[in-house]
Amino acid sequence: MKKFVLSTVLGLVGLTALFVSPASAATVYTDISTSHRAYDEISYLAKGDLTTSDKSFVFSPDASMTRAHAAAMIGKAIQLSGSSSTGKFSDVPATNFASGYINEAVTRGIINGYGDGTFRPNVTLTRGEMALLISRAFGYQSATTNDAANELMRKGIALGVGKGNFGTTQTMKRADFAIFLARSVNTDFRVYGNTDASIDMYVNTNELNFRKGPGTAFEATKMFFEGYPVKVYYTVGDWVYAKGAGTSGFFHKAYLSTDQPTIGSTKEPVTIPTAPVRKALNELKIIVDPGHGDTDPGASGYGYQEKNVVLDVSLRMKKYFQQTPLQVQLTRETDVFVTLANRGSFAQRNNGDLFVSVHANALNGSANGQETFYYAANNTANSTNSKALATYIHERMQEAWGLRDRGVKYGNYSVLRENTVPAALAEIGFIDNKTDNAYIASANRREQIARAIFLGTLDYYYHYDNRPEVALLYAKFSAKPSAKHY
Ligand SMILES: [Zn+2]
C-alpha cells in the first residue's frame, strides 16, 4: 500500500515538472509590467537564466516562494549543476524540477531538511530561512538566523519589517525573493550600493569577458586583456563581482590572479558591441507620437483642436503599455512643438522599436471616417512590417468606433518616410465632421480608441513578429488576439 502511494506522488510531481519552464535569455514574463515594483530585479535575473517558474512566460510575483524554487534560484545564481538527482529526502524524487539544486545545496551545507527525512519542497519560505540561505550561499559566514538577518540588513539586501524586527517567521512572495536575490548577486541593486571591501587582482588570460552577471547567459559588455588590473569585491559561485576600466561587472574567477603577470604591455579593455540578437519583449520600446502641438494646433472643429485630443489619446495609450512588459515613450507629453524631423528620428535617437503617430483629420465637414497610413518604398526594409502594423491598428480602430472605413493606405508622410523602425500613422476620425466629432469629443470614446491602437500593436507583435508570449497579455484588457493577416 505504501508503495502505491509513493508512485502516485511520483506521478503527480512528474506532471508538475512538465510545466516548469526556466526562463531563457530570450524569454520574459508577461505578468511583470514595466511599472511592477520588482521589474528591474526580475528582468535582470531572467536574462541571466536565474529564475524558475511553474508556468511558461508567467512569474506569479504575488505567489508564495516555495523552498524548492528558492533552492533552485539560489542554486542557479551560484552555478550549482541542477542535474536531476536522488538524495536523502523522501519527498524530493529525481523528477522534482529542483532535485539537483536541493541535493547539491544540502551537500554544500547551504540548505537543510526537517530532520525527519523530508525537505517539504512546496512549503513557503520564511524570511529567516531566506536570510540563512543567502548567507550560506554567498559565504557570509553567519552562524545563526539572527546573524544572517543582521548581515543582510547591513549590506542593504533586506531591510527589516519594523523597528528592530527582521520578520524572521514571515513568509515570502516570489517578487520579494527575486529582489533579495538580485541584491545578493549584484550590488547595483542594493539599498546602499556596494559597501564591500576589495582586493587587487589581474587578468591572467589573453582575452576575458566582463559580464553583467555571474554566468555566460548574461551579456558581455567589455573584453579585458592579460595583465589588466581590476578590483574584486565578492564571489558568486565561480564568478566574482569586480570593477575595472570605469565599469562594474562579473569575471569568471579562474582567469584572475593576485600576482601581476609579467608581460610587456597591457591593452586597454574594449567595449563589446551589442550582439544583433532579437530583443526580448521587455526590451522593446514603442514610440507614440501625438501629432502637432503648441503653435501648430492641427485640425479643428466644434471647439476641439487636434493637438489636444491626440495628446489625450496618446497619454491613455501610454497607460496601457505601462501595464505590460513593453516600454513606451511619447514624442511629447505636453502642449509643445516638436519638428517633423525630430519626430522622424525620435525612435532612432531614443532606442525605439516601433512608431505610432496619432492624428485626427479635417477637410470640409462632410468627409468622415478612419484611415491608417504606412510608407512603403520598394527598397525599405520596413515596408512590409509597417503595412502589417498599420493593418492591425486599423482593424482595431474599426472594431472600437466603427466609423466609415477609409482603409489602410500608402502615405508619403515625413514621420513615416524618415523613420528607421516600423511606423504607422492613425487618423482616428474627422474632427470637423459632426458624426466623427461626437466620438472624438467623448473621453470614454477616446479611452476606447487608445485601447484599440494599443491592442493593434499587440496584434502586430503576436502575429507578424511571431511572439507567442504576447497572447498572455490580452486577458488583462479583456481582449483576445485579432485574426492573423500578416
Ligand atoms: Zn494631424
Image (cartoon, rainbow, N blue to C red):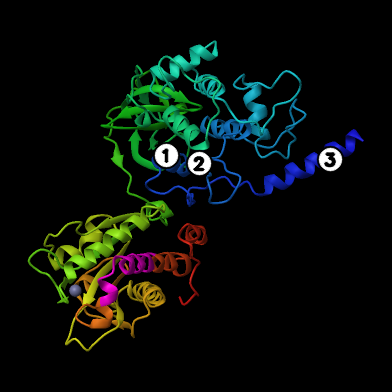
Q: Where 226 falls versus 468 (above or below)?
A: above
Q: Are marks 1 and 2 in contact (CB under 8 Å)?
A: yes
Q: Amino acid at mark 2?
A: Pro
Q: Nearer the viewer, mark 1 or mark 3?
A: 1
Between 26 and 481, the residue placed more toward the observer is: 481
Between 473 and 140, the residue placed more toward the observer is: 473
State how far apart marks 1 and 2 are (Cα). Answer: 8 Å
Instruction: Tell me, for residue 61, which label it has, or none.
Output: 2
Q: Residue furthest right?
A: 1
Magenta range is 438-454
Tell me which corner region of the image, top left, top right, bottom left or bottom right, holds residue 247. Answer: top left
Q: Nearer the viewer, mark 3 or mark 2?
A: 2
On the rendered structure, is 344 left or right of 215? left
Q: Main secondary structure of the magenta part?
A: helix
On the rendered structure, is 30 left or right of 453? right
Q: Amino acid at mark 3?
A: Ser
State how far apart marks 3 and 2 are (Cα). Answer: 32 Å
Q: Name the residue carrying label 3.
A: 7
Q: Where's residue 111, x and y in %?
A: 62, 22
Q: Amino acid at mark 1?
A: Ala
Q: Are marks 3 and 2 in contact (CB under 8 Å)?
A: no
Q: Residue furthest left?
A: 295
- Mark found first going from the N terminus, 1 or 2: 1
Tell me the residue at 42%/38% (across/down). Answer: 41
Tell me the residue at 52%/29% (across/down). Answer: 78
Q: Where's residue 190, x and y in %?
A: 37, 28
Q: Where's residue 365, x and y in %?
A: 19, 86
**Other-residue count near label 3 (Cα within 10 Å), few / some / many at <14 / 14–19 / ≥20:** few
Q: Name the residue carrying label 1.
A: 38
